[in-house]
Amino acid sequence: NHKSDSRGALIVLEGLDRSGKTLQSRKLISYLEGLSYSVESWRFPDRNTGVGQMISSYLANKSELDDHAIHLLFSANRWEKRFVSMSHALCYVLLLQRSLMENKLRCGTTLIVDRYSFSGVAFSSAKGLDIEWCKAPEMGLLAPDLVLYLDIPPEVICSIIKFVVEVKAPEMGLLAPDLVLYLDIPPEKAAERGGYGGERYEQLEFQRKVVRSYQILHDASWKTIDACLPIEDVEKQLQEVVLDCVTTCQKGKPLSQLWS
Ligand code: T5A
Ligand code: NA
C-alpha cells in the first residue's frame, strides 16, 4: 500500500574501533526484521573480495602499503559493491541499471551499513592526508558499470559512454546515507573492550586523531549516540531513530549523492 517512490533507508553506523557498531548492526537487523521490514546488512571493508583481502592483510600488519594506496583500496572496496556483473553485449541495455545499492533501496530494502565513506576519510585524514583529497574518490569516480564491454565496435562504445555519462551524471557518485549513527566512545574506553590492539589502527593516540576527523564530517544526517551506555540502552536509542528514518524513507524521501 506504499507510494511508488517509497524506498528503503540507507543507514550507516560509524565510530571508533570497538564502539559497538557490528554488535548494534546485528541487533538493528533483528529488530527491523521483527517488524517485518525488508532489511539487509552490509559492511565496509568487505574483506571477502580480492581488494578486501589486500585491506585485511594490511590491517593485520601482514603487508605494507603507501597511505594513499590503502586509502584508494578502501574506496575501491565501496565502488566494487556498485558493480553489476554483465557478461555479453546485452550490457548495452543493462548499462542503464542502477547501482546495487540504489536498486536495493528502490526495491524497498533498508540497508544497515557497518562503516562507510566516513571511516575512509576519518582514518586516512587522521594519518595526515588532506581531507579533500580523501573525499575525492568517494564522489568523483565513474561508475564501474562501464567495465565489461565485449565485441562492440569502438564507435558504438564511444556513443554508449557519452550516453551513459549524460544520463547517469546526476547519480555518478556514491549515495549519501539517510542517517549516520555515530557511536560515541572515548578512545580510552574503547581500548578496554575485547580484542583491542590486534589491528593496525587500534592505538590510542591514532584513535584520538580519528575522533577529530569524524567531528569535521558531522552534518545534519548524523545522530550521536553515547556508546558507553549498557548495550541494551544503546540498542533502544538506535531503534527509535532508525524507525523514524525508515518511516520517512517509506514516505518517499528522495535519494541524494554523498557530499554533493
Ligand atoms: N577503515 C575502515 C579505514 O581506515 N577506512 C575505511 O574506509 C574503512 C571502511 C577495520 C579498520 O579499518 C578502518 C577502520 C578500522 O580500524 P572493521 O573491519 O569495521 O574496520 O573493524 P572491526 O575490527 O570489525 O570492528 P571495530 O573494531 O570497529 O569494532 P565495532 O564493530 O565497533 O565493535 P563490536 O560491535 O565488535 O564490539 C566490540 C566489543 O565491545 C563490546 C562487544 O561485545 C565486543 O566485545 N561492546 C560493549 N561492551 C560494553 N558496553 C557496550 N555498550 C558495548 N557495545 C559493544
Ligand atoms: Na566491527
Image: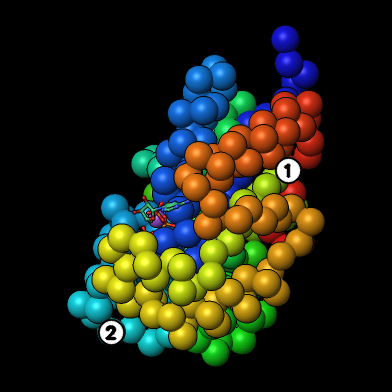
Q: Residues within 10 Å of mark 1 (few under 14, many from 20)?
A: some
Residue with the most extreme bottom position = 128
In-front residue for pair 200/121: 200
Q: Earlier in the sequence, mark 2 or mark 1?
A: 2
Instruction: Quadrant for residue 237, please give it.
Output: top right
Look at label 2 and name its amino acid. Answer: Glu
Dots 2, 1 in contact, CB < 8 A = no
Residue 64 tag number:
2
In-front residue for pair 88/173: 173
Residue at image position (67%, 80%) is: 132
Instruction: Quadrant for residue 226, please give it.
Output: bottom right
Q: Residues within 10 Å of mark 2 (few under 14, many from 20)?
A: few
Look at label 1 and name its amino acid. Answer: Leu
Q: Position of residue 213 (x, y in %)?
A: 62, 77
In-front residue for pair 72/117: 117
Residue with the most extreme left position = 62
The C terminus - image quarter: bottom right
Residue at image position (53%, 57%) is: 228
Can you identify the residue that label 1 sits on? Answer: 255
Ligand 1 placement by image quarter: bottom left
Instruction: Give the structural element (helix, strand or loop) at label 1.
Output: loop
Q: Position of residue 236 (x, y in %)?
A: 59, 37
